[in-house]
Amino acid sequence: MASWEVTTAADNLVSAEVVTADGRLLTASASENEDLFWAIRGGGGNFGVVTSFEFQLHEVGPIVLAGLALYSWDRVKEITSFFVDWVKKAPDELTPALFYNTAPPADFIPESAHGKPFATIALCYCGDLADGERLIAELRALGPEVDLIGQMPYVALQAMFNPLMPKGILSYAKSDYFDDITPEAIDTMIEWGAKKPSPLSLSHLNYYGGASSRVANDATPFAHRDAQFAYSQDSFWQDPSTSDIDIKWVQDYWQAMRAHSPRGSYVNFMADEGEDRVRESYGPNYDRLVSIKTKYDPTNLFRLNQNIKPSGG
């Protein structure tokens, strides 16, 4: 988790060294091979092998206000409705997400909460800590069953969730962007969130506002900057014999959410979902990506990815 104040990693890329399909080493930047520079900032590994990145850096922390607020599952509709309204008024310095999850037996979670279902608000606030505390007071006023929000080093936040996924875990996920989350969509989220077959599985609602939403949809291949939310269904399980059940939960959940007018996925969240989903996720930027792909990789050498096929390929 970072801050929507600094927008996406792709927006902060200054230049890259790229080995193309014909073996050339090219510099891609705003002033050199500009079309390739545009394409690699969201087009994945379709255009070459990137051997180095140069990024614009930003001061963060070192102390931020971050963590989790866990609310009992019997309040899930109240908390979800609050979250959807609250984040729309949030400042750029806040990055928030809402999870439907089962509390794991982690050391930082009270034992009394282990194994219980929750609506969990996760956040990182990277601005003035006093301003952040006033903002978080609104969450605390709701009375979370477990309050794990506090000041911590930014680097500690990045490692906070590492122990939650056991080694060797199996996973499957699907997601979509939404212009808004309606009351009807919330009902669907809650209905299917309660049906998860594994205690490790979860679903999460991410808010995508801040500086990223003020960048044009065609500035990079990322075509959903004006979508306010992304909703993801993530199945995690340990027993291979239950794989069909755990995968079906995600597929059925995702299909139920399709009734609420999604607009494509975040490509890094996609599995092998086919050419139509890739096209949908790049939206009106797809044809431009095809043109650049045809220029730099006409034989589709780089195809083990969310593939953008060259013209005639």
Image (cartoon, rainbow, N blue to C red):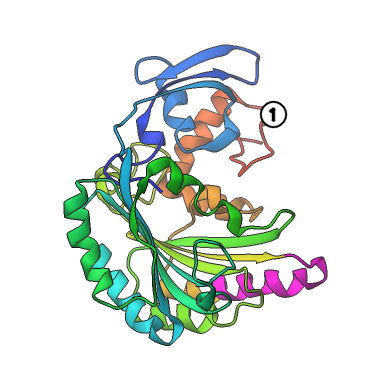
Q: Which residue: 37% across, 83% down?
A: 77
| Residue 211 horizontal side relative to residue 199, left or right | left
Examine the image and state in which quarter residue 119 appears. bottom left
Instruction: Name the one closer to the observer, 107 or 1.
Output: 107
Identity, as a three-letter code, of the amino acid under mark 1 = Leu
Left or right? Give the position of 50 relative to 1: right
Could you tell me residue 37's position as x and y percent?
43, 25
Instruction: Please tell me how crowded label 1 is: few (under 14), some (14-19), or many (20+) other residues with Cα within 10 Å.
Output: some
Residue drawn where x is 52% and y is 13% of the image: 26
- 247 in the magenta segment: yes
Q: Quadrant of residue 298?
A: top right
- The quarter of the rendered structure image containing the C terminus is top right
Q: Which residues are magenta?
A: 238-255
Frontmost residue, 152 versus 265 = 152
Residue 287 magenta: no
| Side of 303 relative to 152 (left or right) | right
Which SS type dominates the magenta stretch?
A: helix
